[in-house]
Each structure stands twice: as C-alpha cells, then as structure tokens.
Image (cartoon, rainbow, N blue to C red):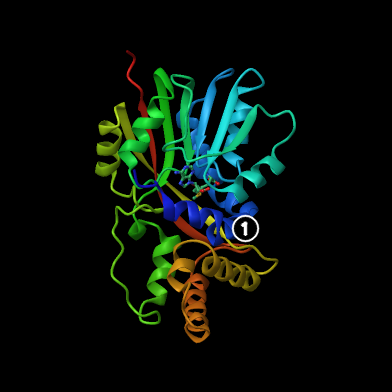
Amino acid sequence: MAEKNVYQVADWNGPGGERWVAYQARLDAMMAVFGQAAIEAAAPATGERVLDIGCGAGASSLDLAARVGAGGQVLGVDISEPLIDRARVLAPQDTPARFQVADASSTELPEGAFDILFSRFGVMFFDDPTGAFAHMRRALKPGGRIAFVCWRGMAENDWVRLPMGAIKGIVPPTAPPDPEAPGPFSFGDRGRVARILTAAGFADIAIAPFDASIPFGEGGTRDAAIDDAVKMTLEVGPLARALADQPEDIRARASAAVRAVFADRPGERSVMLDGAAWIVTARNPAN
Ligand SMILES: C[S@@+](CC[C@H](N)C(=O)[O-])C[C@H]1O[C@@H](n2cnc3c(N)ncnc32)[C@H](O)[C@@H]1O
C-alpha cells in the first residue's frame, strides 16, 4: 500500500514545521479565538477523554486539558516532531495532556476510547480524508462527538486573499491549485466537508460559519507592525510557499506589494486581517 501523507510529513518535519515553531507564540495568538470557538462547540466536560488531531505545539490540547481536569485525558497527536517537541516543552507538569508523534489517519488508536475528537486547523491535510475520518471515528465512544475548526475558501480569507492578490503579476503565474488538494483550504466547500463526514460514518453534522479578525505581526509602532506582518507572511503559510523558489528581486517586489495592501488595513500594534472559518460538529452514532 502506498505510504500516506508523504508530502505533509516531509513539510511539517522540514521547513514548514521549523517556521511554524519559530512563529509559534504569534500563531497561537492569531488562532486563539478560532480554537476557543471550536472548544465551546465541543463542550468538553470534567473527566472526559479528548483526541486533539494535528495538535501542533499543543495550545488547544492544554486548553482542552484545563476543561477536562485531572480526571480527564487529552492526547495530542501530530506528524511533526519539532511541533510535538515544542508541545512537550510548553506543557505544565501537572497537565492531563500527553503528546505523541503520529499520523492521525493511520496510527493505532484505542477503539471506542474517546468522548471527543477535536482539531484546531489540523484536519485539512489528509490525502484520503474519508478514510482518515472513518479511522478516527472508530476511536470515539458510541455517541461520542467531533468538533473542529477549519478555514473556509481562500477568497473569503483576507489574510491570504490580499497578499496573494498583491503578488499577482510579480510572481510568474502557475496553474490554479486544486481546491480539494490537501492543504489549509481543502475544506472550504462545506458540501465537501459534509460528504466526507457522512461517508466516514458520522451523523448530526452541523457546519457553521465563524468569522474573526486576525492580528498579523506585532510591533511598537504601526510601521514596525506592518513590517513584521509582511515578514511573517513571506515566511509562513501559502504566500511563503508561492515565493519559495523565487529569486531575490521578485521576493523584494512581492514584499513591497504586500506591504502596500497591509498598510491599508486597520490595526495599531498589528495588522488586522479578516479570517473566515467553519466550526464543524458531528456525532458518532450510538450503536
Ligand atoms: C495548521 S497546523 C495547526 C496546528 C495546531 N492544531 C494549532 O492550532 O496550532 C496543522 C497541523 O496538522 C498537522 N498534521 C497534518 N497532517 C497530519 C496527520 N495526518 N496527522 C497528524 N497531524 C497532522 C501538522 O503537522 C500541523 O501541526
């Protein structure tokens, strides 16, 4: 059988993972409000067991752990060794959260063991999403629930639409990406998300939009904040990938163009950019 998620494993253990670690504190601050919305949707109760899928550096696992308490358990799994290392460093000693390097789509999971499958932006990267969700569902108790947050389409997310628009005409055009290819926006189509979860055996599927402003970059002055936001955008995420192999002169022009669009956005110590996500919930049918 072909190995699964080969590209993602390489990227999240290579340059993608390293940059994510470097910007971890800022990325956590940027995604916090989305994660909290997903946690409210999951409604973890004291003593429950939670699997945090694609947990990264573990911020959401620790938030979940605070909700389930010492009598509960949170297992954070991620394919990225550098991110799991960071999660272990950040975790307080007395947390009921544990972390494991594993591919959530195929790793052996205890059957019927978890009350909740949870994810903050960690479930859009599977080569075979239906197979992955069916596999993870088997780790849920009958009647157990899933709750995750994922991005809507690129066109609705200013944090990527604006910089990507700015570099058009500077970076040589490439074929438009397959919107269903594994990546941050592969769950943008809510119909597709519903089809995947249905085929994986989930019931009571609900998919609700959730919008929030995201603070990009930080600085003591507005100019410093804009510079920092541009630097980060060129180093982490979709724009970084689009510019990865470009020569210095193109990168410099792209940077200036992104700076110009960011300078038009509000924010004093950060550049505030609109983010658009789905909060998805569903249930493992009771037997
Ligand atoms: C956008 S990051 C989100 C990280 C974290 N949930 C957070 O909110 O900070 C996506 C994460 O999914 C992980 N990931 C991707 N494919 C995975 C898989 N098949 N199994 C487990 N983790 C995976 C990546 O390594 C990465 O840490």
Residue extending farthest to the front is 1
Three-letter code, disc 1 = Tyr
Q: Position of residue 174 (x, y in %)?
A: 32, 73
Q: Is residue 275 visible?
A: no
Q: Position of residue 118 (x, y in %)?
A: 47, 33
Q: Residues within 10 Å of mark 1 (few under 14, many from 20)?
A: some
Q: Quadrant of the C terminus?
A: top left
Q: Nearer the viewer, residue 154 or 100?
A: 100
- Which residue is under mark 1? 23
Q: Position of residue 76 (x, y in %)?
A: 56, 35
At horizontal 38% and vertical 31% (from top left) the residue drawn is: 135
Asked if 51 appears above or below 273 in the picture, the reply is above
Per the image, label 1 sits on a secondary structure element best described as loop
At horizontal 41% and vertical 31% (from top left) the residue drawn is: 136
* Left or right, residue 28 beside residue 257: right
* Left or right, residue 265 beside residue 47: left
Asked if 28 appears above or below 140 in the picture, the reply is below
Image quarter of residue 69: top right
Residue extending farthest to the right is 93
Image quarter of residue 200: top left
Asked if 228 appears above or below 279 in the picture, the reply is below
At horizontal 28% and vertical 38% (from top left) the residue drawn is: 196
Q: Is residue 192 visible?
A: yes
Q: Position of residue 160 (x, y in %)?
A: 43, 62
Instruction: Report if the beta carbon of the residue with label 1 is closer than 8 angstroms to ligand 1.
Output: no
